[in-house]
Amino acid sequence: MSTKSHALTVEEIQLRSDIDRSLRHPVMFFFTSGAAWLAVSLVLGIIASIKTHNPAFLGEYSFIQYGRAFPAHINTLVYGWGAQAAFGVMIWLMARLSRQPSKNAGTLLVAGHVWNLAIILGTGGILAGHGTGKHWMEFPTFVWPVLLASYAAIAIWVMISFRVRRDNHTYISQWYILGACVWFPWIYLTANLYVNVFDVHPLMAAAINGWFRQAMVLLFFVPVGIASAYYITAKITARAVYNYSYAVGGFWALAVIAPWAGMHVVMGTPIPLFLQYTGAAATMLASVPLIFSGVHILKTISGHSELTADSPSLRFTVAGMFGLLALAVLGVILAHPAAIRYSQFSLAGYGYEILALYGFFSMCMFGAIYFIVPRVTRREWLSRRLIRTHFWFSVYGVCFVLLFCTLLGSFQQGAAQENFNQPWKQAVNSTFPYAVGITFAWCAILWANIFFFIHLTLMWLRLGRRSTHPTLLRRDHSELGPHGPEGDVDELESAKA
Amino acid sequence: MTLKTFIIGMLASFGLAWMCMIAIPVAKMASLPAVKMSSEEDADYYQHQTSGRIVNGAAIYAANGCYTCHSQLIRPTYLGSQIFRKDFAGVSNADGDTRRETHYDDYAGEKYAQIGLTRMGPDLSNFGHRAEAYGVKTGMSAEQWVIAHLYNPRNGALQLGEQGEKIDMTWSNCPAQLQMFEKKDLVGQGDNLALDADTDAMTQIVPREQARVLTSYLLSLKRDSAMPESMDHTPKVPGSASAAAEKN
């Protein structure tokens, strides 16, 4: 992983470009359709958020009322954007690390189309008033088997490309990707069978839903984000991962702790107490592997601040790692039984989801996308200004949600709810400024992602720069750099041939 | 590491948690023993009683996202003080005090306990009682009151103060469920659940089936039945916090 790019043999370059070419269409399909869903989700999120402080916004139409727009927003964010970005990164990373070109681009593309179709139907179902009312599982119940089947068709090729890897060494990113591959179907199937199919106690169904959400964050989004971060940092800094056995220890710590987490969201319900408190304890304890991986990755980068400022991939990844550390700390604060009194029914849970899905996971995925897309399209990003706008507005938006709305706002709201001598109106009013704040933050993030989406679409159409020099954020490449003097990438190739 | 050892490691680490957190508790919660109301030998067994169109109503409640703002949970006092908030946990007046925590049978008949995501709106555990009281105050039946509230949650005429004055409700951010209503020609004496507002002599606005079912479900929310002695943790000592709350 640490080999410098200019010291490669011709065969090695040929192999990499074969891998990239074999996966060009599925990877670009997942990224662009994911980005489109991100845009849809952000628009729905803004509508939902405005409706919390101005319920008559855009008219009182049933399909965009808060109770439908909000679930549609979260589900498109999780399955439309999050899962698809993860699939793109998983299949590409696994192929590159196993050093085997993919022979199944067609299957992956078909599965990707089925996945998108299921999400279109599911989102339409929620907006039309057929949601199931189980957070993160609101798609009408016919959707989940379709999603699971198309997931299987995607993940099986990730596993197979690991099976046929060229050398026996297992990179740390492969551990995490394989983990996510195995955990996702298990979590998703468990949650859907117990909540939607089996006849379980209604309170246990709610508890399993809480466990499902936390497991999706800690055992799917976190491992994929960490896998991508390990890869990007090692690649761009041209350094080996700081200490391999530490990294493996971090993986197994996550594997052992995280499956217990999550049921603290139903704390106070009459279900066995050990479920509630084990859930809280494991959520807090899971901060150990998260902080461990975050610090470990930042340690690999330490001393490369110039590189971090220049490289879009590294800059987004570093921001994602700070998001990971914040996620760990926020998990400890919000899951603590003393805080649950205030945080359980406030906007804190939503703030945690925004931080997990955007502040950490999406930032890592953007880092990976800025790295992968030029390689699979053989075109460089068009504009550093677009990338910088994307970065800064994303960071501003997430920081605002985290500090202002989640930490300050939710405790203010929770305290007002607890103050039982005051009328309920006070609890609603205390939410108002933070609801407005979340709207502002989503607007900033939408602004950032409009540019990202346009940029990505242009790259998909192969309208990127035909240069051998990658797009850096602060300066141009020097002629002495690892990529040599600038030239046209296609002309260079034909000259070599 | 081979794929096989990896899978075994995953099975062990995840499988143990899965058994302890999901499979066993679900099986245990599926066969809860019956509980006697008191320790006396001939005491009755606790039996949850409810009425209304609970299954369909809960589905409409879920599909329209009521749970995103309304909770249905009265937590124990060590986790929150909503039990003391007026009319949240039961009815407390001169005739007695029925306030209590949520019990595991309170969601009987529903597929999924709608604990709720936030409390942007008030808790609905005992909404049935509140709706009846509001109805009496405004001279409507409880059903009429809920339907009028679904049509326009910001209607000040639905909340009357001590002297019968209208209370400003424009601060409410609850969405109106206009899709549950339709305009119909007035026939005969009209629909007894038709709304007062927004109509002329020839037409009236009547609730669709959805609104009627949802109303039936909402009116069934009365989770303050007497608990078996062994499970009733509600503090009722005079001079305690609950007594202080009653003054308000």
Image (tube, coloured by chain):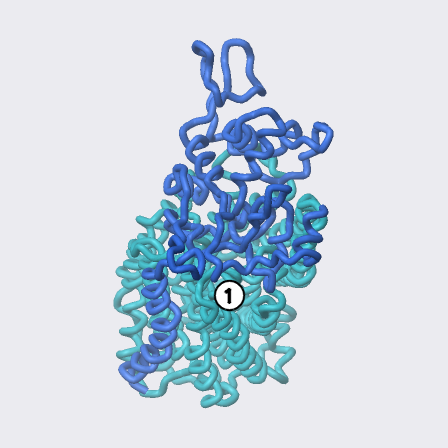
Tell which of A1 and A467 is nearer to you: A1
Kindly identify the residue that appears in the image at 53 percent across and 55 percent down: B101
Residue assigned mark 1 = A264
The answer to whether one can see residue A467 in this image is: no
- Using a 10 Å C-alpha cutoff, classify the residue at mark 1 as few (fewer than 14 neighbours), some (14 to 19) or many (20 or more): many
Q: In which quarter of the image is residue A107?
A: bottom left
Q: Which chain carries label 1?
A: A
Q: Which residue is drawn at 38% across and 63% down?
A: A27
Q: Colour of chain A?
A: cyan
On screen, B72 above or below A294? above
Residue B142: x, y in percent? 53, 31
Q: Is residue A252 visible?
A: yes
Image coordinates for residue A368, horizontal then vertical, percent: 48, 69
Residue at the limit of the structure toward the front, as seen here? B41
Quick check: A381 left or right of A25?
Answer: right
**Which secondary structure lies at badge 1?**
helix
Callout 1 amino acid: His
Instruction: Determine whether, in the image, residue A142 is placed left or right of residue A317.
Output: left
The chain coloured blue is B
- Identify the residue shown where x is 51% and y is 79%: A289
Position of the N terminus of chain B, as image quadrant, is bottom left
Q: Is residue A201 left or right of residue A6?
A: left
